[in-house]
Image (cartoon, rainbow, N blue to C red):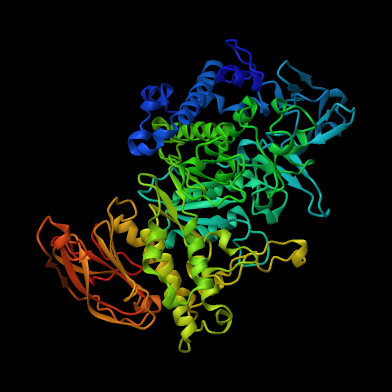
Amino acid sequence: MDITEKFLRHTTRPQRPKTHLKVEQNSTVTTISEDSSSMESIEGDAENAAIFGVDPCLKQFKDHFNYRLKTYAERKKLIEKYEGSLESFAQGYLKFGFNRDQDGIVYHEWAPAAQEAQLVGDFNGWDGSNHKMEKDEFGVWTVRIQNTGGNPGIPHNSRVKFRFKHGNGIWVDRIPAWIRYATVDHTRFAAPYDGVYWDPPPSERYEFKHSRPPKPMAPCIYEAHVGMSSSEPRISSYREFADYVLPRIKVNNYNTVQLMAIMEHSYYASFGYHVTNFFAPSSRSGTPEDLKYLIDKAHGLGIHVLMDVVHSHASNNITDGLNGFDVGQRTEESYFHTRERGYHKLWDSRLFNYANWEVLQFLLSNLRWWMDEFKFDGFRFDGVTSMLYFHHGINMGFSGNYGEYFSEATDVDAVVYMMLANCLVHNLLPDATVVAEDVSGMPVLCRPVSEGGVGFDYRLAMAIPDKWIDYLKNKKDEEWLMKEIVWSLTNRRYTEKCVSYAESHDQAIVGDKTIAFFLMDKEMYSGMSDLQPASPIVERGISLHKMIHFITMALGGEGYLNFMGNEFGHPEWIDFPREGNGWSYAKCRRQWNLVDTDHLRYKYMNAFDRAMNLLDEIFLFLSSTKQIVSSTSEEDKVIVFERGDLVFVFNFHPENTYEGYKVGCDLPGKYRVALDSDAFEFGGHGRVGHDVDHFTSPEGIPGVPETNFNNRPNSVKVLSPPRTCVVYYKVEENIDVGDGEMGTEKRFDQ
C-alpha cells in the first residue's frame, strides 16, 4: 500500500484537517523552521540526494534510500498537516500528562486498550470514583480536576497514578506516562515508584541565570554519572555535583559534560539505561529544580551539557514503567511492538514501535522537554545500533560491506524517527550537539538530514577502546604495531565526525578494568607515592596512560570523551549496589582524594589530561581538517603526524631514546615544544628541552611529494625519549611564547 496510507493505518490517524492533539505554540519558545530547500532536496528521487555526491558507492542502494527518504518526507508532511509543524508536534507535554489552566488541572493519557479509567492519588484518598476519565475516538483518556478555594485540585508534590481496567476486567494502577517526577519509598525493599505531581509555586521554582554558552569548535566531553560522583559510598546529588565536580571539569578544560542516568530508572545498577519514566529526572539525586541548578551552573562556567538519552528501548518493569500500559493490545495501540519484535533478548527490555504517531510524539516531545525545561544543549543517543537494525546488532560483526547497512534488516521506521529527532533538535537549537552510539558504522549516519543523512553531528568511535584493551590484555610492548594503532584511530568515514575515547564507562564496569588498572594493577595500591622512586611497572603505567589517552584524542576523531575519574587513572572498576555485592556502594563512587593528595602520582595523569584539553583550546587541532600521518616506524616504534599545524611525535619504544630524530612537517620555520608528556609536572624526567628552537630544512623538490621526506616538504630534528609524546608548534614572529612549553597554564597570546 502507499506509505502514507500505511502510516495512517498504523497510527489510526484519519485524513482530516484537524487532529485531536493539536497544541498551541508556546509563545515563550523560539524555533527556527527548517529551510524549505533542504526538504525539497530529499522529497524527490533519492538520485538527487547530496549524500551520493559525498559517497558515490551509495548509489547501488538507491531504492533503499528512495524508500527511506520518501517515508521521512511523507511523515513530516503529515505531522505538519495535522500539527502545524514538527516543533509544535514535539510539544505534546502541553497536552498529555498534567497541565494546569485557569480553572484547574487537565490530565490526558493515551491508553486505547483500557476499558475504563480513573485518576487516583493523595488528593482524592486513592478513590477515583469522583475522577472517572472519558475516552475519545483515538484512545486518549481525559479528566479535569477543578481548583478548590483558589488552590490547585492536586497539591504540588503529591502522589498520583492512572488507574484503568483492561480487557479481562482487572483494574491496575500505573504511573502516568508523561509524569515529570517519580519517587520511591526507600524504607520498603524493592518498593515500586510513585508518580508525583510536580508544579512548585513560583517561589520554589529554579530560575535560570545564565544563557547557553557558545558551541565549542570541537567537543571535549566529560562523561559523568551524578549519583556515583561522591567520594563517599553513597548516592550524590545534583547540587553536590554542581558545586564540587563541575569546578573540576572546568579546571581540566573540558568544554562539555555528558550526564548519564538522568531519566528516571528504578534499577540503579542499570547505569540509567532501563528507563521507567522518560520525562522525570532521577529522584535519587534530587528534584527537577536541583537538576536545573546543575545545568545553569555548568552554563555559567561555559560548559555545554549533553544528556545521555535512551530512546532505543524501555524498562521491562510493569508497575512503574511505560511497559505497564501494554495489556495485550495490538501493535498500533501500544508504545511497543508486540511478540518477539517488541523485546530485546539481551537487554530484557521493550522496543518502541517508531511507526506509531503517538510514539513519535512521545519521543520527540521528550527531547524538546529536556531542551526547553532543563536547557540541555544536546544529546548522546544510546543504543543506536539496536535501533538501526531488526537484529539489533546481536551476534553481528560488521565488516563494512554496504549490504550490511541497507537491506531488509534495516529498521526504516527507526531511522526515520532519528531523522525527525535530529531535524527537530537542530531546528530548535542550531548549536546543539547530537552524538550517536553506533558500533556498526552505518554510512551517512552523521550527514545532515537535508542531504539525505540521518542527521547526527558525531558518532562514538567505539572500536578504539576495544583495540587498546586487546593490546593491554594480549600483547607485549614490543608486539604493539604502529600501523595497526594508526589504522584503528583513523578508520572512520570521510566527512562524518567522530568522538574518540580510550575508555568510557563501558570499560570501567565490574568485571573489566580501567586502563590504569590494566597497566599497574595491584601496584596502584602500594606504588603511587611520590615520596619514593617509581617502580618500573608504575613508571611504564603512567607513561602509557598519558600516551594512550593523548594519541586517541589527537588522532582518533573530531571530538574527545573521557569518563569521570579516568583523567587521573582511577583504579578498580565500577560496581553498582546489587545483590551480588551485598548492595555495596564501595565501588560506586569516585576517589577524588587520590588526585587531591599531593604526594600521590595520580596528580601527574590529571595534570596531563588538563594540558591535553588546553592544547586543543589554544590550537583548535581537533576541529582542523588537516590530519596527516607521515611516519609509522615499526622498528623505531614511533608515530609522527600533523593535526592542524601541530607536529606530534609518539615514541612507544620501551627503551630507545632517539637524538636528532628526523620528522617531517608541512610548514617551514622555527618550532618549539607545545606539550611534553616527559615534563616534570606530568611525572616525567624532563629530558626534552623546552627552550630549544628547532629549525626546519627543506626536503626534495617543492610540489613533488615523492621526493620529500615521508612526503612532507620540510623536516625538523628532535629528541624523542622512550614512552613519551611531544607536540611541536610553529613559532610565529609576532607571538610572545614566554617559556615556550605549555603546561597547565596558557603560555600563548591568542
Q: How many tags in the picture? A: 0
Measured from the top left, where is residue 329 in percent x and y?
Answer: 77, 28
Residue extending farthest to the top is: 16
Depth check: give the residue in front, 443 or 695: 443
Q: Quadrant of residue 576?
A: bottom right
Measured from the top left, where is residue 237 in percent x and y?
Answer: 63, 55
What is the quadrant of the C terminus in the image? bottom left
Asked if 296 appears above or below 43 in the picture, the reply is: below
In this picture, residue 266 sits left or right of residue 708: right
Q: Which residue appears at 47% of the width and 77% of the height?
A: 476
The answer to whether residue 302 of the structure is visible from this angle is no
In this picture, residue 90 sits left or right of residue 587: left
Asked if 743 appears above or below 702 in the picture, the reply is: below
In this picture, residue 49 sits left or right of residue 305: left
Q: Which residue appears at 64% of the width and 49% of the height?
A: 273
Q: Which residue appears at 70% of the width and 54% of the height?
A: 268
Depth check: give the residue in front, 128 or 561: 561
Measured from the top left, where is residue 583 in percent x and y?
Answer: 75, 63
Residue extending farthest to the left is: 701
What is the quadrant of the N terminus in the image? top right
Depth check: give the residue in front, 264 or 355: 355
In this picture, residue 78 sits left or right of residue 13: left
Q: Quadrant of residue 320?
A: top right
The answer to whether residue 407 of the structure is visible from this angle is yes
Residue extending farthest to the bottom is: 532
Q: Quadrant of residue 314?
A: top right
Q: Which residue appears at 45% of the width and 37% of the height?
A: 455
Depth check: give the residue in front, 365 or 300: 365
Measured from the top left, where is residue 260 in percent x and y?
Answer: 58, 52
